[in-house]
Amino acid sequence: MSDLIITKAVLEDSAAKLQHISDELEHQKSDDRALSEVYGQRDVQKAMHDFSGDWKIHRNKMKGAVKDLGEKMRKASENWSALEQDLAEKLSTEHHDAAAGGAA
């Protein structure tokens, strides 16, 4: 089993990809009427109409879930950056204090 490695770049990339998915879902069309002639046979038209209605419902659910996940990923990235900064400051302070203490 491999270790889980998290980096700021991975979090930012994941947030960007989720935003892209959210944008794609936002711009999807559910209206099948424009293509009704393409389907030809009435049973196929009905099936596509039913699918279109279901797709609209499920797409809206997915949009909400992806948007929520994207917001959480952006927040995780912000928190990760803040944590890195905080750790760097503390390590720098401890290193400086240890160097000053050793010189006395």
Image (tube, rainbow, N blue to C red):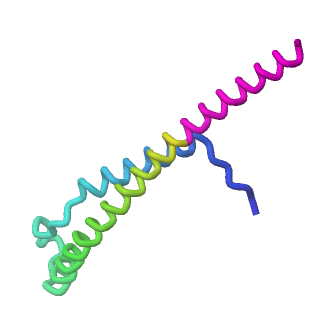
Residue sticking out furthest to the bottom:
43
| Residue 29 picture location, percent across and down | 20, 61
Quadrant in which residue 39 is drawn: bottom left
Does residue 90 belong to the magenta stretch?
A: yes
Q: Is residue 103 above or below residue 83?
A: above
Image position of 44 (left or right of 62): left
Query: Which residue is nearer to you in this view: 65 or 83?
Result: 83
At x 16%, y 83%, the residue is 46
| Residue 44 picture location, percent across and down | 20, 82
Q: Is residue 43 above or below residue 88?
A: below
Query: Which residue is nearer to you in this view: 66 or 21?
Result: 66
* Quadrant (top left, top right, bottom left, bottom right) of the C terminus: top right
- Magenta segment main secondary structure: helix
Image position of 96 (left or right of 81): right
| Residue 10 picture location, percent across and down | 57, 44
Q: Which residues are magenta?
A: 80-104
Image position of 72 (left or right of 88): left
Query: Which residue is nearer to you in this view: 46 or 77?
Result: 77
Does residue 94 belong to the magenta stretch?
A: yes
Image position of 62 (left or right of 104): left
At x 78%, y 24%, the residue is 95
Q: Is residue 80 above or below residue 59?
A: above
Quadrant in which residue 88 is drawn: top right
Q: Is residue 26 above or below residue 79?
A: below
Residue sticking out furthest to the front:
104
